[in-house]
Amino acid sequence: MIEVATRRMIQVWDLHTRIFHWSLVGLFVFLIISGDLGDDLIEWHFYAGYLLSGLLVFRLIWGVVGSEHSRFISFVRHPLHTMGYLKRMIQGKAEHHYGHNPAGGMMVIVLLVLLSVQVASGLVTTDDVIWDGPFYSAVSDDLAELGSMLHHQVQNVLQLLVVLHVAAIIFHRFKYKDALVPAMVHGKKPDQGGAVSSGSAGLLASFVALSVSAGWVLYLFSLPL
């Protein structure tokens, strides 16, 4: 009988990061659909935006106090280093990373920044008919107009980046046999040699991140539209 060796799996992504990721995916899809359809879905579009802003607040905190591979310090690299990695990746010579590789890390930062701009602009925008963002009355007309413009333009950029992100995942799957999607479901990746599971962050870190993000979301829901 031939025995097939199974590679040891190690924990890379903690539960918080995985829930964040898939919640972000679901909310992003709903926001795109509800924003395009408008009408009766606009109110829910705002509410989904509130939830998305809570996710962003959580991720910013988790990027500092979370588990090893979720921290910004573990995957944010100098742009020149990232460009070098991209070159090696295209050549099929890229080194293995358990967490985000330099290109993936750059994508994470760009997406977080643009999503933050998208959320902030949505909070001050108006449709000039029925719906106003909760902070619309607190800003000048010029700033509200800028917010409306950004809210429409950044959406297009985000959709393009998501397509690139999915394409990169497919590329890694076939070029490097790196199953990134399943890893973001169960949190584990094959051990490439002597790695140690990153584990989870402490209870205090979880409490702080969840409390601050939940408090922010509850505050937004308390505001009139």
Image (cartoon, grey):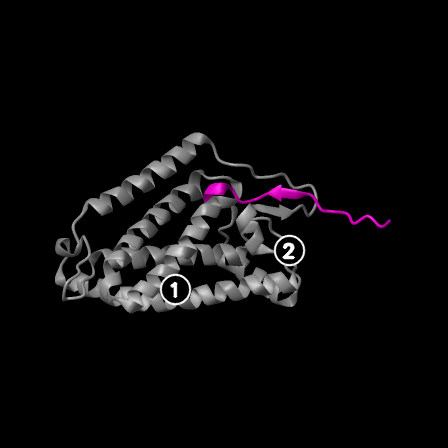
Residue depicted at x 16% and y 56%:
136
Residue 1 marker = none
* Image position, residue 82 (x, y; %): 53, 59
* Image position, residue 1 (x, y; %): 87, 49
Q: Is residue 72 visible?
A: no
* Image position, residue 13 (x, y; %): 53, 45
Task: Give left or right: position of 183 versus 17.
Answer: right
Type of amino acid at the residue the image marks with label 1:
Leu
Task: Give left or right: position of 112 versus 139.
Answer: right
Helix, strand or loop under label 2: loop
Residue depicted at x 49% and y 59%:
79
Q: Which residue is mark 1?
A: 158
Magenta stretch in the rendered image: 1-16
Q: Which residue is mark 2?
A: 95
* Image position, residue 182 (x, y; %): 57, 53
Vertical side of 148 occupied by 223: above or below: above
User: In which quadrant will I find the C terminus?
Assistant: bottom left
Residue depicted at x 14% and y 66%:
129
Along the line of sight, the residue nearer the viewer: 175 or 78: 175
Residue 51 magenta: no
Residue depicted at x 61% and y 67%:
90
Question: Could you tell which of marks 2 and 1 lies nearer the N-terminus?
Answer: 2
**Residue 62, quarter of picture:** top left
Residue located farthest toward the right when viewing the structure as drawn: 1
